[in-house]
Amino acid sequence: MGSSRLRVFDPQLERKESAALSDRELPLPTFDVPYFKYIDEEDEDDEWSSRSQSSTEDDSGDSLLSDRYVVVSGTPEKILEHLLNDLHLEEVQDKETETLLDDFLLTYTVFMTTDDLCQALLRHYSAKKYQGKEENSDVPCRKRKVLHLVSQWIALYKDWLHEDEHSKMFLKTIYRNVLDDVYEYPILEKELKEFQKILGMHRRHTVDEYSPQRKNKALFHQFSLKENWLQHRGTVTETEEIFCHVYIMEHSYVSVKAKVSSTAHEILKVVAEKIQHAEEDLALVAVTFSGEKHELQPNDSAISKSLEASGRLYVYRKDLADTLNPFAENEESQQRSMRILGMNTWDLALELMNFDWSLFNSIHEQELIYFTFSRQGSGEHTANLSLLLQRCNEIQLWVATEILLCAQLGKRVQLVKKFIKIAAHCKAQRNLNSFFAIVMGLNTASVSRLSQTWEKIPGKFKKLFSELESLTDPSLNHKAYRDAFKKMKPPKIPFMPLLLKDVTFIHEGNKTFLDNLVNFEKLHMIADTVRTLRHCRANQFGGDVSPKEHQELKAYVTHLYVIDSQQALFELSHRIEPRA
């Protein structure tokens, strides 16, 4: 007998089918909501069964849901009801229910608002009847299931729920409900303690304190204490970090990772060190696209001004009207090349991994959902993901910039060899995001055309680079990369653009709603792909660089100098190696 799949049906369609078979005297459903039905997968005539096999089963046998069934489609309320019915109150859920719960929590924002979910959970918690009848023995069980789901929700979203007023109010409301119920149902005390832990309550109470005579006093004490969990993290302008682009001239900038609240003095100090000029000789200037200039004072908020769509941040020399010229073939560009050539290659790759891991580890799984389903693909819900994607682009530009700013052929050859070794080390350290970016940077047209440079690369380096290139081969849906990455143990950083491509492919290839029901099978496939992040971060990265080199390397990889114009890069390329 084949495994079974669970589908939540549209009641109107079911009534039509039942009416057509009325002569066989089959019983008609007596309720007006979608209901559940098991479909045998061996029935090839059923379109849902065959579609389920082709899109959800894993040939390797690793699929968490291939053992029994999945929810194929349904209304949000009925999917939630089914989920609560299937939850177990034991410490460990069965795989099917555990994955269904995780799928729901990861993707619920696609088909319902957080407020809708909060209201639905409150209704289930406070319902006087269970499955249409009075079941006193089932009331505490149902309440505990709701509280278990809420605990899992909080554990998955963590501080994301800080920003949502609906969820904060919901948690306070349901906490008060538990306080009201714990005297009548002492079995809820375990869940109450869990909520106290989650909400950051410092004071603990006994069941007796929740008696009708004392619960109001207890409630007062609880909410008069500091609620750490419910405290807002602060405004975005105070805490969030971005990559601030400080332009040296029209197409070249220093990428500065800084808090949005950073002052002009803090930004200028970083840039001055990066371009090796005295800070007192420089000025930070906001320039609008219409040409208007406004010099920022040391204590001015720098990034808020630069983030305006109408302008950019530039660094000017105070004694000149023009910006600094990074293209000059002078001692400064030679020193820049000498600086990276003197750095330990493994330690430099390790510092890249440290920096990239801090970005990757900050990405919430929900960000991939928002990025995929949001037409903008950016904003406050995808801030960390956007940083890592931006970092990937900047690494690619950084490689090309460093090579093309090196006018001496011999040193340029050393630089190319250096970057090939760094790419190999990134692969060894399982940082596939920077690995891809460096290889693509070396393959940039403005770099790959440097025939004089590549002719002088030793054969063993050419062979190594060819092997590294093979991992970036896009044929057979990036099979080489996928096979290699699958064998790598965590911690590891995937090539994020490809992971987003996978999620987008599932999204665009499948409808989110079928017959006005949520296509939960699609959401399961998306959630399964998003869980790649969880697997990659199963272990934490702890690479260390020698203390004396750490600060220099950290400053170097944190604030990259790049040229963001392909035309400017080509001009440099033709300047150092003109056409024959």
Image: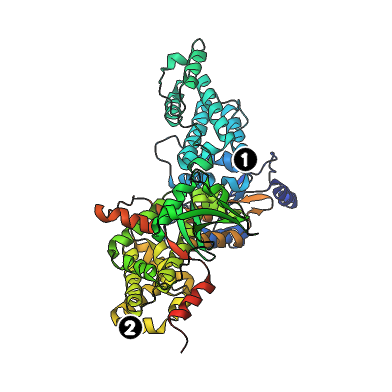
Counting from the top left corner in percent of width and height, residue 231 is at 49, 31
Query: Which is more toward the observer, 297 or 477?
Result: 297
Callout 1, which amino acid?
A: Glu
Residue pictured at 49% horizontal, 36% vertical: 233
Furthest residue in direction bottom, as rendered? 580
Number of other residues with Cα within 10 Å of mark 1, as a class: few under 14, some 14 to 19, many 20 or more: some
Residue pictured at 69% horizontal, 53% vertical: 515
Task: Give the alpha-carbon distance from disc 1 to disc 2, as whole Å.
Answer: 67 Å
Model colouring: rainbow
Residue indicated by mark 1: 77
Circle on res. 456: 2
Q: Nearer the viewer, mark 1 or mark 2?
A: 2
**SS assignment at label 1:** helix
Query: Which is more toward the observer, 271 or 505?
Result: 271
Q: Return the disc, 1 or 2, that comes first in the chain's sequence.
A: 1
Query: Which is more toward the observer, 174 or 271?
Result: 271
Residue pictured at 39% horizontal, 36% vertical: 91
**Which corner quadrant of the image does residue 118 belong to?**
top right
Counting from the top left corner in percent of width and height, residue 517 is at 65, 49
Instruction: Classify residue 264 as left or right of residue 77.
Output: left
Q: Does the residue at mark 1 contact the one at mark 2 (Cβ under 8 Å)?
A: no
Callout 2, which amino acid?
A: Lys
Counting from the top left corner in percent of width and height, residue 380 is at 56, 47
Query: Which is more toward the observer, 177 or 245?
Result: 245
**SS assignment at label 2:** loop
Instruction: Classify residue 102 as left or right of residue 517.
Output: left
Counting from the top left corner in percent of width and height, residue 189 is at 43, 23
Q: Is residue 385 above or below residue 31?
A: below
Furthest residue in direction front, as rendered? 319
